[in-house]
Structure formats: structure tokens, C-alpha cells
Image (tube, rainbow, N blue to C red):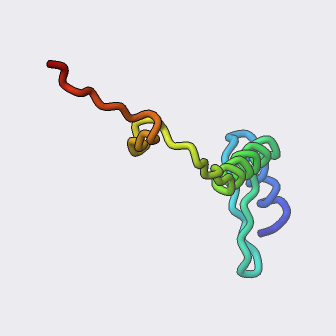
Amino acid sequence: MCDSQLGRALELARRTGDRLIYVADDKAMVLMGLDEYENLMDAATWRAAESAYIQPETSVKPAEAREPEEPEEDDRFYLEPVE
């Protein structure tokens, strides 16, 4: 692609806000606005950090998930019939 055609394509991409795919020597590059690229990188960084975060396991279970505890010997009492 000669310089004048590349310049026209870049100007068109700038005016429309579209991305431009430039292919030369079997290599392709995507050209986009710097603000758009920064937003794209911020979003990718956020997703990577979010997927890398592992919530620590806790030994405390919610009340409904706990198994009933056996009462200790001192906590047990028996009622005897009274005559």
C-alpha cells in the first residue's frame, strides 16, 4: 500500500472511529485510537486480575450448612417421671 493510500485509510479510520487492519509482508496489525486501546487494556487487566483472585476457604460454615453438634455431657439432662 503506498503512503497516500495508507494516509487516506488512516484518515478514514480517524473520522469514523473504526479500527483499521493493515496487512504487509504476511503480517496483520490492527490500528485503533489510543483511548480505545487503553480502555481495552484496562478491561483485559481487570478480567485477568478477577480470574486470578481465589477466595480463601474458611473453616466457618454458614449456620444452615453446619451439622448439629452433640451436646457435651454436662449439657444433657433427663426428666424423671414424678408420681
Q: In the picture shown, does residue 9 fall above or below 77?
A: below
Q: Is residue 55 visible?
A: yes
What percent of the width, then of the height, locates residue 57?
60, 52
Q: Quadrant of the N terminus?
A: bottom right
What percent of the width, then of the height, locates residue 34?
82, 46
Q: In the picture shown, does residue 81 fall above or below 60?
A: above
- Seen at 23% across and 27% down, the residue is 80
- Seen at 66% across and 46% down, the residue is 18
Q: Quadrant of residue 15?
A: top right
Residue closest to the eye, 47 or 75: 75
What percent of the width, then of the height, locates residue 71?
42, 39
Residue closest to the eye, 33 or 62: 62
Number of numbered discs overlaid on the protein picture: 0
- In this view, which residue lies farthest toward the bottom? 25
Q: Quadrant of the C terminus?
A: top left
Residue closest to the eye, 34 or 72: 72
Q: Quadrant of residue 76?
A: top left
Question: Horizontally, is 79 left or right of 26 in the view?
Answer: left
Q: Quadrant of residue 68?
A: top left
Q: Is residue 65 visible?
A: no
- In this view, which residue lies farthest toward the front? 83
Residue closest to the eye, 68 or 54: 68
Q: In the picture shown, does residue 62 fall above or below 55?
A: above
- In this view, which residue lies farthest toward the top? 83
What percent of the width, then of the height, locates residue 25?
76, 81
Question: Horizontally, is 55 left or right of 76 in the view?
Answer: right
